[in-house]
Every structure is written in structure tokens, then in C-alpha cells.
Image (cartoon, rainbow, N blue to C red):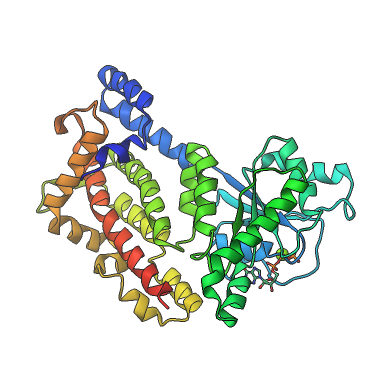
Amino acid sequence: MGNTKSTYYGFFKEEEVKELSSLYNEKGFEAVVSRIKEKNEALENETLKIAVTGESGVGKSALINAMRGLRDGDPGAAEEGCTEQTMKVTAYQHPQLPTVCFYDLPGVGTTKFPSTTYVEKLELDKYDVFLIVLGVRFMENDVFLARKITEMGKKIYFLRSKIDFEMENLEKQNRQQDREREFDKIRQYCIEKLEKNKFPSQEVFLVSSYRMNDFDFLRLCEVVKSDLSENKRHVFNLSLPNFSTAVIEMKKASLHRKILGAAAASFAGGACPIPGVSIACDIAILVKTFLEIRKSFDLDDNSLGSLALKVGKPVEVLKAEVKNPFISDITITSVLRLISCSAAAIVMAAEEAIHFIPIVGSVVGAPVSFLTTYGILRNSLDEFGKSAVRVIIKATKK
Ligand SMILES: Nc1nc2c(ncn2[C@@H]2O[C@H](COP(=O)(O)OP(=O)(O)OP(=O)(O)O)[C@@H](O)[C@H]2O)c(=O)[nH]1
Ligand SMILES: [Mg+2]
């Protein structure tokens, strides 16, 4: 339970904790729980709109698929390798998070679609994140939309796509050791072109949509994340495909919020005593939240199956890394079994919640249903995270 403070202060900012303190003194724990629920609902409803643009063929569709954890041909995937460019904006919803949407904005060039009304139709002000994909050769067209976006005071992230091709070329020549030098050259080329077009001090991220774990994808995610508002940052975390162990850590932090939301919901709903242990909680909420956590870490059968296909390994090999049988079998019965087997650990995890809400001060102030629901979920979160890390390591091992 070491880092309770930092974890929890992540949910409530310092000034909010002070506010909660007076709320608790005036109206009791119920008011505190309502505040947690409000915060959680705001998170659940938060939208994230990510626009992707660039010249035809640079890899926009592949990127949108990769960032949604999909492959070309999967249901809902954007069609890759399709050369016909239209002037239409196409929206692609995230498969698990309906409030997260990617938008394929056709690359607009001065020569192709010069009209201002066309740019107006793109409604650039509605997007939270702009990713501009650059190809091997920098095109003047690449900066046409970029200029419009910056005029609106919005930030743009420039990506140089298909960097795995450059890596493969080096490998073919047995020059892997030159990787950093060659990549710096590519970065420098893009930066100089951008500077010439009046986009100074830009970071250019070298990415591959087919090898997200390599190159600059993680760095891109970290930078985008750091520029987002608090709620959008959490939504962004949860939307990321599990391409690296660092992503699992980001997700774990955001799933803490879900756990607190579930605890608050269980306080409001009817908590039932669990036979054999001195614990009362809402089993339906627990089952639902466990399933969400499992899905978020891609540990369900479907996700493991897709990952196995993607990396060309038998699904059994990946499933074997999910060491905890509970993760593969989340039902009312298995949750009840889990509770009765780990009552002591749950109480310990529940005590963590007391530190989180320092205003409560002692277990006496907080209702049992809130604490136990929190304790049960919190106790298992690390287990899920560990399995997810093991699966990724196995999947990416050459
Ligand atoms: N090796 C490699 N190939 C990629 C990558 N991204 C895209 N491609 C390939 O490049 C081609 C074009 O990719 P798309 O994603 O369809 O490009 P697009 O920008 O959506 O193209 P339009 O829809 O025509 O504007 C396809 O054959 C992809 O398979 C990548 O990161 N690595
Ligand atoms: Mg496309």
C-alpha cells in the first residue's frame, strides 16, 4: 500500500480535498460519495476527438486502426491501402469507448481544395488532438491544414509514418547500429521542412503503425497526454491499445478512478452481506467492474485471440501468462469465492481508501459497502495489471 497518497491525490486535487473536508463535516460521508460519483460520471461522459490528417497514402487509416487496437479487415476498421481520396471526413469510433472518436480528415492542399469554405466545413475547432502524418517526402500540402489549425490556437503533433521500412532497410544492409544516426537524419529533414514553412521548434515523432512498441509511439502518447485536460487524459489512457508495459501502468492509474466510482455506486445501491465473511457489498457492481478492468487490459478471450493473430503466436501461449484463474472466469460465483478467500487482504486494501479520503480519518466514518467494494477491486487491480504485462512481454518477445 506504499504510494497511497500520490495515487489518491490523483483523483482529488489538493484544493478539492479541502472542500471535501468541509462537505464531510457538514453533510457526512454520503455527500462525499456523491462528489466521487459526480467526478466519475464526468469521466465516463468525457469525449475525446482525435483528428488525423496528411497526404494520401501516408498511413492515416493504418494509424487510426492501430490506435484503436484494430487491424485492417477487422469489423469497424478503416480500409488501408485504399487510394481514392475523398473530401469527406470519416469518423471511426473506439471499439470499447464510445466517447472516443478518431476522424480521418482528408489532406487538404492549396492546389487541391483551396476553398476556405471547405476548411470551415471541417469544423476544426471541435477536435481535441491533431495528428499530422508526414510521408517520406515532405509536401507543401502537409502544412496547409496545419496552418489553419495553429491559427485557431490549437496544438499539432507531427508524425513521420512507416518508420519500420527504414529500420528494415538498415537491417537488410546489416547496419542496425546506424539506427539512431539515420533516424536523427529523418527527424532533422522533417524539422527543417517544418521550420521553412514557419513551424519552428516542432518535435517530430517517428512511428510505425505496425510496430507501436518500437520507435516513438510511446513518447507521442506521453506528450499528447501531458497536454490534455485531466479528464481527457484519463480517457486517452484508457483508449490506448496495450502495446507496451508502460501503457499498462498508465491504464492502472486511470482504472483507480473506475474503482472509486464503483465503490461510490455500491454505497448508493443495496449492499448485501456475504455469507461466511464480515463483508457486505454489491456483487453485480463488482462483476461489472471486474469485466471492465479485464477488457481494458485486453485479457478477455476475444482480445487475447486478436493479439495472438496479430503476433502470430498460439493463443494458448498468451493465455498461459494469465496466471490467475479468476481473471479467466469472472462470475457471481467466482467473485464470491474470491471474497471469502481474501477477506484479510481486502480489509487491508480498504484501509487504503481511508488514507485517500483523509477527511474521514477512520474506518468508523466510512460505510462498509464503500470500503469493501473498493478493497475488493483494489486488491485485484495489481493482479490484472501483472497478467497484462506478462501477456505483452510474451507477445512481443521475438
Ligand atoms: N510498413 C508499414 N506500412 C504502412 C504503415 N502505415 C501504413 N502502411 C501501408 O501504407 C499503405 C497506405 O496506408 P493507409 O493507411 O491506407 O494510408 P492513408 O493515408 O489512409 O491513405 P488514403 O486513405 O489513400 O489517404 C497501406 O498499404 C498500408 O499497409 C506503417 O506504419 N508501416
Ligand atoms: Mg485511408
Does the rendering let one see residue 240?
Answer: yes
* Quarter assignment of residue 52: bottom right
Residue 58 is situated, as x and y percent measured from the top left of the image, at 71, 64
Query: Residue at 64% of width from left, 67% of height from top?
Result: 162
User: Residue shown at 21%/44% (left/top)?
Assistant: 2
Q: Which residue is at a point 46% across and 40% down the rendered structure image?
A: 43
Judged left or right of residue 382, residue 226 is right
In the rendered view, tell whether residue 101 sits above or below residue 312: above
Count the labels in the image. 0
Whether 163 is drawn above or below 110: the answer is below
| x 15%, y 45%: residue | 348
Q: What is the quadrant of the C terminus in the image?
A: bottom left
The foreground one among 106 and 178 is 178
Residue 32, percent across and down? 31, 28
Task: Please state which of residues 146 and 258 is positioned toward the viewer in this rendering.
Answer: 146
- Residue 123 visible in image: no
Q: Nearer the viewer, residue 391 or 279?
A: 391
Q: Is residue 194 left or right of residue 159?
A: right
Quadrant placement of the N terminus: top left
Residue 258: % across, % down:
37, 46
Q: Is residue 309 above or below residue 268?
A: below
| Picture layout, residue 248 above or below residue 155 | below
Left/right of residue 119 with respect to residue 233 in the rendered view: right
Q: Quadrant of ligand 2?
A: bottom right
Q: Position of residue 203 (x, y in %)?
A: 61, 49
